[in-house]
Amino acid sequence: MMILHTESSPNFGGQELRTIHEIEGLKKFGIESILLCKKNSAIEQIAQKKGLKHFTTTFFSSIDPIAALQIIMLVKKFDVNLINSHSGYDAWCAIPACLINKIPFIRSRHIGLKLKDKRTTRFIYGSFARKIIATSGYIATQIKNIGINPDKIEIVPTGIDSEKYINPPSFDLRKKYNIPEKNIILCFASVLKSDKGPHILLKSLPDVLTKMPDISVIIAGNGNFMGECRKITEELSLSDHVIFTGHVDNIPGLLKEIDIFILPAIRPEGIPQSLLQAYASKRPVITTDIGGINEAAMHNNTAYLVEPRNVEALSQGILYLLKNKDYSKNIAENAFKLFIEKYTLSSMLYKMNEIYREVING
């Protein structure tokens, strides 16, 4: 079986990482994959580094004859059985290849932005797609709301490799960044963009530090919001407490050495991989009560939830977890149990294998 994954996004975040993990992991089920991505994109660099079979194209719009022709050629050359498109431009460019070669099309939806209720949207998700993969129930609801048949939608949350987080390599966080032994370590680890809310975390810190000054805050990741986060850090005189690490390869090792994980997202999305990574690491989590996230984060059970954009609520939540160690330990243990039950990489791969075989054989 051969799957062609198409991805027109130039960025690299949870969506693109999931695709990489799927390509790698499904080999054990006898499924081979090809990736067609945008030239000079971040996912191209990762695929090249990992030695995955990949090709690049322009993907400059939803009407891109060059990209469409390349997809047609790849389908014929590698005898592709199915195309799974992960973004907007590439989905439209895949249509001719599917029609000419009479192969099924799957549209994966990873982001929580509201879909436009237009005829073209209903076509690509409705009459054309054989199946739709939604990475959270919230996203599935967004798709249903434009009139798509619920029977076509499969909710498959992104899975995390449990073994990497249960037994991670050492990171030596305190030594690497000269963090005093007495300091508590808070951590935000995700793509640095405004949707994830790193600025909300930074704005909550002055109140926290007035009550508990022995705190260091790790901001791990890169993104287009880095400059704004550094600006806020300077304006609030937080430079002695906030450490920007940039991209971190050993996230499992990093998470094992922090005290609290914080994800103050301000917009709905799929279930974030960073949240699940913290669960797998048995770290207590503070996050927001917002679509996608609140499917896996239940207040006082698997996480401490606060209202999105509420700086005061976030600072109070941080202080509450710091002062209530038993509470923090309990929600971390509950979150780990939930992760093992529902959100492992093996669960995701098993489900995707079933879907692909059903679509191809059906």
Image (cartoon, helix red, strand yellow):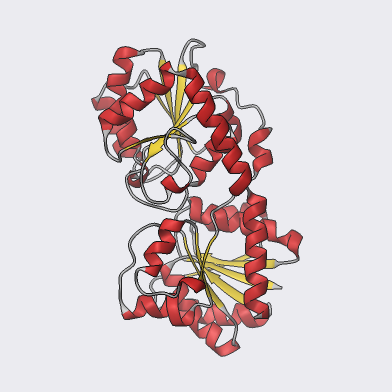
Foreground of the two, 223 or 20: 20
Quadrant of the rendering where the N terminus is positioned: bottom right
Residue 302 at what x, y percent from top left?
49, 36
User: Quick check: can you spot residue 258?
Assistant: no
Q: In this view, does 220 lie to the left or right of 103?
A: left
- The residue shown at (38%, 73%) is 61
Quadrant of the image occupied by residue 286: top left
Residue 222 at what x, y percent from top left?
43, 41
Residue 19 at what x, y percent from top left?
57, 58
- The residue shown at (49%, 12%) is 180
Residue 291 at what x, y percent from top left?
38, 51
Q: In this view, does 149 lie to the left or right of 104?
A: left
- The residue shown at (56%, 89%) is 100
Quadrant of the image occupied by residue 70: bottom right
Q: Which residue, as the protein is rendered here, is positioned at the far left? A: 235
Give the vertical position of 116 relative to 155 (above or below).
Answer: below
Foreground of the two, 226 or 291: 291
